[in-house]
Amino acid sequence: VLTHRYLLNELWAVPTDAQYLRVYVRQLRQKIEDNPERPHYITTETGIGYRFRAPD
């Protein structure tokens, strides 16, 4: 599980609003998920961050 804070620090060099991360993850899901509304590869861990799963 990658925390919101970790991802924000790693992806953007300057302090950034968490909304940017949500938008970015949504765009990634649109590109890689078969059904972005029911994600398999990038799942949300509520209040923590995101879990990334390798393809089966």
Image: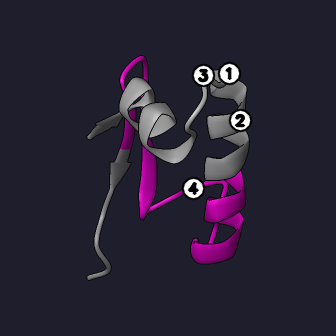
Callout 3, which amino acid? Pro
Other-residue count near label 3 (Cα within 10 Å), few / some / many at <14 / 14–19 / ≥20: few
> x and y percent of residue 56 in the render?
26, 82
Q: Where is residue 45 in the image (x, y as percent from the top left)?
A: 38, 32
**Nearer the camera: disc 3 or disc 2:** 3
Residues at marks 3 and 1, CA–CA distance in whole angstroms: 7 Å
Residue that label 2 marks: 20
Q: Which numbered disc, 4 or 3, marks the residue closer to the eye?
A: 3
Q: Residue at x 62, y 62 (%)?
A: 29
Dot label at residue 50: none
What range of the chain is rendered magenta? 26-50
Q: How crowded is mark 1: few (under 14 residues within 10 Å), some or many (20 or more)?
A: few
Residue 17 visible in the current orientation: yes
Please tell me which residue lies in front, 17 or 28.
17
Marks 2 & 1, CB-CB < 8 Å contact: yes
Q: Which amino acid does label 4 sit on?
A: Arg
Instruction: Give me the C-alpha separation between circle 2 and circle 1.
Output: 6 Å
Q: Which mark is residue 15?
A: 3
Amino acid type of the residue tagged 2 in the rendering: Tyr
Q: In this view, does 26 lie above or below 54?
A: above
Q: Which numbered tag is attached to residue 38?
A: 4
Which quadrant of the figure has residue 38? bottom right
Q: Which residue is denoted by mark 1 in the rendering?
A: 17
Secondary structure beneath label 4:
loop
